[in-house]
Image: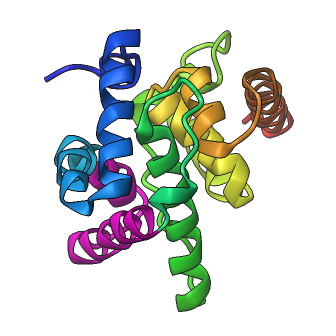
Amino acid sequence: MQGNKGLYHQTEQQLNSEQEIIEAAKKDLLHFKKLYNKYYEQIFRYVYQRMDDKDTAHDVTSQVFLKSMNNLNKFKYKGVPFSAWLFRIASNEVIQFYKDKKSERTVQIQTDYIQDIVANESELRREQLSIVIEEIAELPAKELELIELRYFEKRPFKEISQILNITESNAKVRIHRIVAKLKQSLKNNRL
């Protein structure tokens, strides 16, 4: 299986071919199946990473594809894969799910990547690791999503910018500020 980079970065020919499928699907939704088959697994993994239940993740993923199919005529090609639009819909659906349930979003923190976030720090002791995990878990939803996309899912800034509908430089600046805040918190809580 390809890594995330291979899934997002496509040649111009691949993007043009995908655009042809999208245009065909706008005229006849039977062509939408190609897009569904191509992106279902990626979108499901993205949603499931943010859920604590596989069945719920399947339901939310189904909603993502239903919304994308129903709004396909609103899709405007911007030179990036169709998946960027799907990820944006998925992000909104996850947020809406937790608003509707009036519950806290699941945070699946991968401790292997914590060291990447607080780079330039010496090896984290168990207590320091706990502090960083607590700080990440308490981040506002949009900041948490930036950290997840960049550090846990290893997505490039260009993809993050498309998913969140912000500029690439804005994604870099926001992530830098969040990381600086986490590092400062770690320094303030040295044990």
Which residue: 59% across, 30% down?
78
Looking at the rendered image, the quarter that the C terminus falls into is top right
Magenta stretch holds residue 45: yes
Which residue: 79% across, 40% down?
189
Give the overall secondary structure of the magenta segment.
helix
The magenta stretch is 43-70
Looking at the rendered image, the quarter that the N terminus falls into is top left
Magenta stretch holds residue 124: no
Q: Is residue 181 left or right of residue 163?
A: right
* Protein image colouring: rainbow
Q: Is residue 167 left or right of residue 54?
A: right
- Asked if residue 119 can be seen in this view, the reply is yes
Which residue: 60% across, 89% down?
102
Q: Residue 103, percent across and down?
A: 56, 84
- Asked if residue 125 can be seen in this view, the reply is no
Q: Residue 17, percent across and down?
A: 30, 24
Relative to 19, residue 79 above or below = above
Quadrant hosting residue 81: top left
Q: Is residue 177 left or right of residue 37?
A: right
Which residue in the rendered view is the most extreme toward the front?
27
Q: Is residue 128 left or right of residue 23?
A: right
Q: How many tags in the picture?
A: 0
Q: Residue 135, percent across and down?
A: 69, 50
**Along the viewing direction, whichever of 127 and 10 lies nearer the viewer:** 10
Quadrant hosting residue 53: bottom left
Q: Residue 73, percent across and down?
A: 50, 58
